[in-house]
Structures are given as structure tokens and as C-alpha cells.
Image: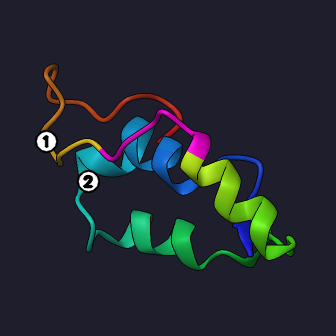
Amino acid sequence: MGHNPEDAVSYWNRCGRYHGGKFQAVRKWMLEPNNYRLEYGPENCSRGGKSKSRYKKPRKPRSGKIPKGC
């Protein structure tokens, strides 16, 4: 299984990190079946390994507001 259209690292860095890992919005996104697609194992693993993206640490937004689209 792989995330589609946005992978988990991209979602976390764009939105999730401002809420925190246990926040309801993040859990809802991770559990939403429409965010997944069935993929052959080696393709999914190699794509993740080739990606330069890494999880960023949780933090509060600078402006105090969650970015639009989150």
C-alpha cells in the first residue's frame, strides 16, 4: 500500500507537523482509505528510499494559524 496522491512525509511536512501526531486531523488523514492505493512492494519501497524528503519535527506555526489547506 502506498499513499496517493500525496505521500505521508509530504503531508506531515505540509500540515501534520503543525497539529502533532496524535491530533484528530492527522489520524483522520492516515486512516482515510481514499489516500491509499495498492502498489507492488518493491516499487513502493524504492520510491520512498529515493525520496530526499524527511519528516520534520512537530512545531507551532509562526503566525499562530495553521496553513491553508490543512
- Regarding residue 35, the answer to whether it shows in the image is no
Residue 53 in picture, x, y percent from top left: 45, 36
Residue 51 covered by magenta stretch: yes
Residue 39 in picture, x, y percent from top left: 85, 70
- Name the residue carrying label 1: 59
Residue at 26% x, 74% y is 22
Alpha carbon distance from label 2 to label 1: 8 Å
Residue type indicated by callout 2: His
Magenta stretch bounds: 50-55
Please name the predominant secondary structure of the magenta segment in the image.
loop
Asked whether, in this view, residue 8 is left or right of residue 59, the answer is right
Residue 54 in picture, x, y percent from top left: 37, 42
Contact between labelled residues 1 and 2, with CB atoms less than 8 Å apart: no
On screen, 64 above or below 29?
A: above
Q: What is the secondary structure assignment of the residue under circle 2?
A: helix
Residue at 73% x, 62% y is 44
Asked whether, in this view, residue 16 is left or right of residue 56, the answer is right
On screen, 55 above or below 22?
A: above
Residue at 18% x, 31% y is 61
On screen, 40 above or below 8?
A: below
Residue 33 in picture, x, y percent from top left: 74, 78
Mark drawn on residue 27: none
Residue 5 covered by magenta stretch: no
Q: What is the secondary structure assignment of the residue under circle 1?
A: loop
- Name the residue carrying label 2: 19
Asked whether, in this view, residue 23 is left or right of residue 45, the answer is left
Dot 2, how many residues are within 10 Å of its Cα: few (below 14), some (14-19), or many (20+)? some
Q: Earlier in the sequence, mark 2 or mark 1?
A: 2
Residue type indicated by callout 1: Arg
Residue at 16% x, 20% y is 63
Dot 1, how many residues are within 10 Å of its Cα: few (below 14), some (14-19), or many (20+)? few
